Image (cartoon, rainbow, N blue to C red):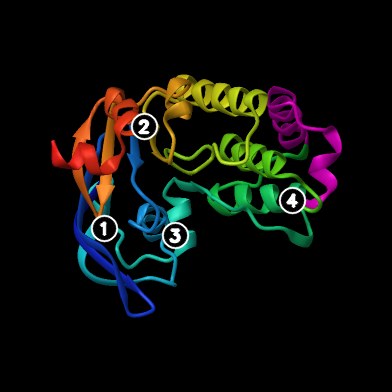
Amino acid sequence: MLKIDNLCVKVDDRDILNNFNILINDGEVHAIMGPNGTGKSTVSKVIMGSPDYDILSGSIFFNSEDITNLEVDERSRRGIFLSMQNPISIEGVSNSEFLRTALNARNDEAIRLFDFIKTIESNIKDLDIKNDIIHKSINDGSSGGERKKNEVLQMKVLKPSFVILDEVDSGLDVDSLRIVSENINKYKLENPNTSILIITHYPRILEYIEPDYVHMMVGGKIVKTGDKNLAFEIEKTGYNEVVSE
């Protein structure tokens, strides 16, 4: 589904990604771990098409199509979704307006109001979110945990085929982490061909969402790949020890 070949990226004249490579097949769950500043979040933003990053060389392929130079909205329409590390507030735009507009932009036909309300109510209940969130401005006055739940709500409504979770576990208490993970797992179960890329510092979310592969990233590229046991090895010994093995 996703293939990145020898990607080199810089921001503000600073090299971030250095010959970064990854291959994610349909239905696979991958996790990327690495120390601060190694470029993990850059990977997510470059896949999504952020204009803040300059691609020096390399290519990004999605379902065999070269999307390296596509705009963000074009990537979204193809089924790519990013759950942001720090979701922002947008005053004056309600969650309902945002989601209906996004859905109608992605689909050939406008969604019926009744179907939209039914979908929203079901997912809000699953995520244990207050009912009035749909009428509030996006993330206005919301806690960190509520913002992350709202990101997962967007994922479930928009139904992407490739999901990037950039530190979705940060700022979540134990109960919220469980609820968020259960909803992601349920979405994956209902859409088995969906691929997921998890970017995280800690292996606790991988106890809920089991990855097929864990990649360790250092210096802007992947230096080691393994199963979920690699994540627990990193937590136990640290990145330097794992790299030196």
- From what the image shows, is residue 88 above or below residue 1? below
Disc 3: CA contacts within 10 A as few (<14), some (14-19) or many (>=20): some
Amino acid type indicated by mark 4: Asn
Q: Magenta region: which residues?
A: 114-139
- Eye-nearest disc, 3 or 1: 1
- Eye-nearest disc, 3 or 2: 2
Residue position for label 1: 220
- Calculate the distance from the C-alpha at mark 1 to the C-alpha at mark 2: 20 Å
Name the residue furthest bottom. Answer: 13
- Calculate the distance from the C-alpha at mark 4 to the C-alpha at mark 3: 24 Å
**Mark carried by residue 139:** 4
Report whether residue 28 is seen. no
Q: Are marks 1 and 2 in contact (CB under 8 Å)?
A: no
Residue 133 colored in magenta in the image: yes
- Eye-nearest disc, 4 or 3: 4
Percent across and percent down for residue 164 are: 44, 44
First of labels 1, 4 by sequence position: 4
Quadrant where the N terminus is found in the figure = top left
Residue position for label 3: 74
- From what the image shows, is residue 34 above or below residue 31? below
Secondary structure under tag 1 reads loop
Percent across and percent down for residue 209 are: 44, 24
Q: Residue at x 24, y 44 (%)?
A: 240
Residue position for label 2: 235
